[in-house]
Image (spheres, rainbow, N blue to C red):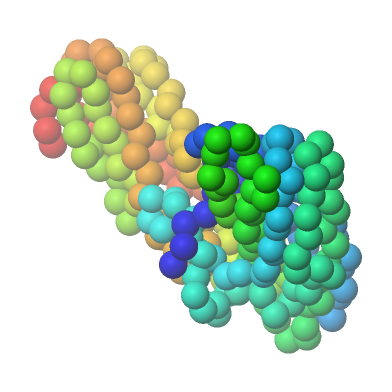
């Protein structure tokens, strides 16, 4: 499995990618395509690949299966799993060169077969090499891309369960809450939520959003750590709320005292 520099949030319109030396700097738009498509539907798409670096770039693209690890890291798979849709996607070109300050439009087509249900996904990946490079450098290579999520309307089964909501660490400096979620449905789920902390009298102390999580794939498991820094001393109750649809949510609570492990 190969890790990749890629956007994983579903509300971004573009994504800036750069290597640590900033020799390669590109903008991908859209970084994510989220499409409701019926069976036997064809959909033409285009991806804007802008070279905002100083060197000419050679790019090789492909359609690749991927997954999210439990901590949310995206990895490219060697073989597709049952939820992949790589065989639904065709690209017009596989290799191209982009000059500095130029933009290349990658075109492709999605063909949804009959008899499918739920949600599917794949990545359109770009292997990028700097050709000329910055004087004195040796050139670099990075991998990025666009995520494609396809939902089949009226066939999705959304089911998210909370495996656990615990206090992983409890010190006077910070309290760390651990949330473990599992997707039992047949489609990807977009997640948002927070941990609402109240004192012994029920007064709200802090509201902490669930960070670094937006999508859980079917059969996927996600561990989310939420940090309460510089907590107020005393007893508290933490209320978890996780939204995963227009009106679907999970709630749980746990009580503790700052500086005391449960």
Name the quadrant containing residue 53. top right
Does residue 204 appear anywhere in the picture? yes
Viewer-closest of 174 and 7: 7
Name the quadrant containing residue 120. bottom right
57, above or below 18, in the image: below
Residue pictured at 42% horizontal, 27% vertical: 208
Left or right of residue 102: residue 89:
left
Residue 162 spot, x, y in % from top left: 38, 54
Left or right of residue 177: residue 127:
right
Residue 255 spot, x, y in % from top left: 23, 32
Q: Residue furthest bottom?
A: 115
Viewer-closest of 28 and 150: 28
Residue 11 spot, x, y in % from top left: 68, 41
225, above or below 180, in the image: above
Image quadrant where one finds the C terminus? top left
Residue pictured at 81% horizontal, 68% vertical: 93
Residue pictured at 66% horizontal, 38% vertical: 25
């Amino acid at each position: 499995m190969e890790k990749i520099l890629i956007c994983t949030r579903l509300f971004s319109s573009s994504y800036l990618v750069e290597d640590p030396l900033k020799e390669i700097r590109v903008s991908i738009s859209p970084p994510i395509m989220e499409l409701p498509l019926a069976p036997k539907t064809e959909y033409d798409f285009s991806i804007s690949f802008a070279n905002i670096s100083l060197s000419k770039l050679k790019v090789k693209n492909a359609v690749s299966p991927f997954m999210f690890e439990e901590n949310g890291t995206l990895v490219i798979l060697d073989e597709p799993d049952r939820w992949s849709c790589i065989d639904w996607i065709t690209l017009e070109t596989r290799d191209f060169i982009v000059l500095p300050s130029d933009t290349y439009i990658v075109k492709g087509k999605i063909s949804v077969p009959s008899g499918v249900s739920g949600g599917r996904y794949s990545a359109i990946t770009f292997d990028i090499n700097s050709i000329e490079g910055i004087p004195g450098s040796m050139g670099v290579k990075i991998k990025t891309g666009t995520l494609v999520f396809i939902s089949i309307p009226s066939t999705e089964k959304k089911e998210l369960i909370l495996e656990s909501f615990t206090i992983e660490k409890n010190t006077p400096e910070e309290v760390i809450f651990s949330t473990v979620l599992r997707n039992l449905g047949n489609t990807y789920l977009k997640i948002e939520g927070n941990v609402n902390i109240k004192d012994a009298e029920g007064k709200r102390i802090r509201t902490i959003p669930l960070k670094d999580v937006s999508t859980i794939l079917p059969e996927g498991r996600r561990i989310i750590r939420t940090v309460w820094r510089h907590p107020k001393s005393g007893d508290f109750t933490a209320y978890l709320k996780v939204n995963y649809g227009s009106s679907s949510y999970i709630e749980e609570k746990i009580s503790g005292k700052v500086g005391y492990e449960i």
